[in-house]
């Protein structure tokens, strides 16, 4: 079974966003294909040694993005939007690289606006 690993490069991001990024990465990499069930919130919380509410917050965020469907009593299932997952994965990588280089969000936004 695939596992979800937090990216150390995103250490500055809030924990629920790091978890969401890790799930996006796993889905984008094909570790959890469309229709597959993700680990339970309790199981993932235990694996990552975090509070279950943090995992639930990440799962709700991914559900709002259209990546997951949350079914009460049945868990979280991948419903698609792999292109969206890849877009968010790339965004997470850009933010991590910008942080590593000491580029502020304001500077990053300015560069993006100049290039669009």
Image (cartoon, grey):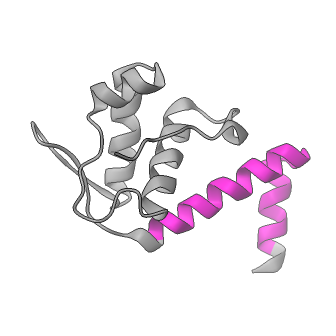
Q: Quadrant of the C terminus?
A: bottom right
From this view, report whether residue 62 is shown above or below residue 111. above
* Magenta residue check for 108: yes
From this view, report whether residue 47 is shown above or below residue 21. above
- Estimate the x, y position of residue 84 in percent, counting from the top left: 46, 68
- Marker count (numbered): 0
From this view, report whether residue 111 is shown above or below residue 51. below
- Estimate the x, y position of residue 19 in percent, counting from the top left: 49, 39
Q: Residue furthest front?
A: 1
- Estimate the x, y position of residue 30 in percent, counting from the top left: 42, 64
Which of the two residues, 91 or 48, is positioned nearer the viewer here? Answer: 48
Q: Quadrant of the N terminus?
A: top left
Q: Give the quarter of the image for residue 72.
A: top left
Question: In screen coordinates, is 2 left or right of 63?
Answer: right
Residues shaded magenta? 84-113
Q: Which residue lies furthest to the bottom in this view?
A: 116
From this view, report whether residue 97 is shown above or below residue 51. below
* Magenta residue check for 52: no
Residue located 45% across and 20% down the image? 50
Q: Give the quarter of the image for residue 64.
A: bottom left
- Estimate the x, y position of residue 93 in percent, counting from the top left: 69, 56
Question: In screen coordinates, is 36 left or right of 112?
Answer: left
Residue located 90% across and 48% down the image? 101
Residue located 63% across and 63% down the image? 90
Question: In screen coordinates, is 19 left or right of 103?
Answer: left
Which of the two residues, 37 or 67, is positioned nearer the viewer here? Answer: 37
Q: Which residue lies furthest to the right in this view?
A: 102
Q: Give the quarter of the image for residue 14.
A: top right
Principal secondary structure, stretch drawn in magenta: helix
Residue located 84% across and 67% down the image? 111
Question: In screen coordinates, is 30 left or right of 105?
Answer: left
């Amino acid at each position: 079974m695939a596992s979800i690993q937090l990216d150390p490069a995103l250490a500055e991001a809030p924990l629920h966003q790091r978890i969401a990024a890790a799930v996006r990465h796993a889905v984008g990499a094909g570790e959890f294909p469309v229709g597959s069930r993700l680990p339970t919130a309790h199981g993932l919380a235990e694996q990552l040694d975090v509070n279950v509410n943090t995992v639930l917050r990440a799962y709700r965020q991914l559900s709002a993005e259209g990546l997951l469907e949350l079914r009460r009593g049945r868990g979280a299932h991948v419903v698609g939007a792999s292109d969206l997952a890849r877009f968010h994965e790339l965004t997470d990588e850009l933010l991590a690289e910008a942080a590593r280089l000491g580029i502020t969000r304001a500077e990053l936004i300015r560069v993006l606006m100049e290039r669009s």
